[in-house]
């Protein structure tokens, strides 16, 4: 989806620091998701037991998801910059 449709980019008025943090959180989200599938798949198939790494990554992934959702809510409801609508095109007016 990301490769085919791209991403909407940062909302107008986003500072350089905020944009940098957001970009790295987004990269970490993709990385953690891919690593979850790889570590889970290798453990499941008995290639190598990465069960502990998989479990640790799950904590990292859920911390990232929480940060991502909190930032989206802050932008949408405090800064009122339409971030949620950028994430969910069906909400666009
Ligand atoms: C975002 C995707 C995933 C999340 C959030 C996730 C989450 C978790 C969590 C929390 C556990 C620990 C359960 C426990 O011990 O209480 C676990 C274990 C496990 N998961 Fe996943 N998982 C994901 C994807 C996958 C995939 C794609 C596979 C296989 C193809 C997989 C295979 C396994 C296996 C084999 C274990 C047991 C590991 C062990 O030996 O402790 N997981 N997963």
Image (spheres, rainbow, N blue to C red):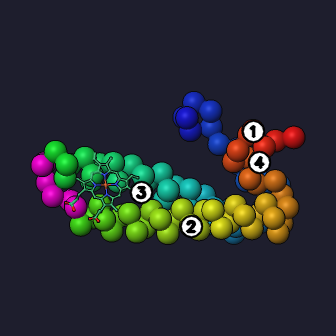
- State the CA–CA distance, disc 3 to disc 4: 24 Å
The location of residue 1, given as percent across then percent down, is 55, 35
Name the residue carrying label 2: 66
User: In this picture, which residue range is highlighted in magenta?
Assistant: 46-51
In magenta stretch: residue 65:
no
Secondary element type, mark 3: helix
- State the CA–CA distance, disc 3 to disc 1: 27 Å
Specify whether 57 is left or right of 14. left
Q: Residues within 10 Å of mark 4 (few under 14, many from 20)?
A: some
Q: Nearer the viewer, residue 34 or 62?
A: 62
Name the residue carrying label 3: 32
- State the CA–CA distance, disc 3 to disc 2: 14 Å
Residue 91: image quadrant is top right
| Residue 16 appearing in the image | no
Which of the two labelled residues, at mark 1 and mark 4, occupies the earlier sequence position? 4
Name the residue carrying label 4: 85
Q: Is mark 3 within 8 Å of ligand 1?
A: yes
Q: Residues within 10 Å of mark 3 (few under 14, many from 20)?
A: many
């Amino acid at each position: 989806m990301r490769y085919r449709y791209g991403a909407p980019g940062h909302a107008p008025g986003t500072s350089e620091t905020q944009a940098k943090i957001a970009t790295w959180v987004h990269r970490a989200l993709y990385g953690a998701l891919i690593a979850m599938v790889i570590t889970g798949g290798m453990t499941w198939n008995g290639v190598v037991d990465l069960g502990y790494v998989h479990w640790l990554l799950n904590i990292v992934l859920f911390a990232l998801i929480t940060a991502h959702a909190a930032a989206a809510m802050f932008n949408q409801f405090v800064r009122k910059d339409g971030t949620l609508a950028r994430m969910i095109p069906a909400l666009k007016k």
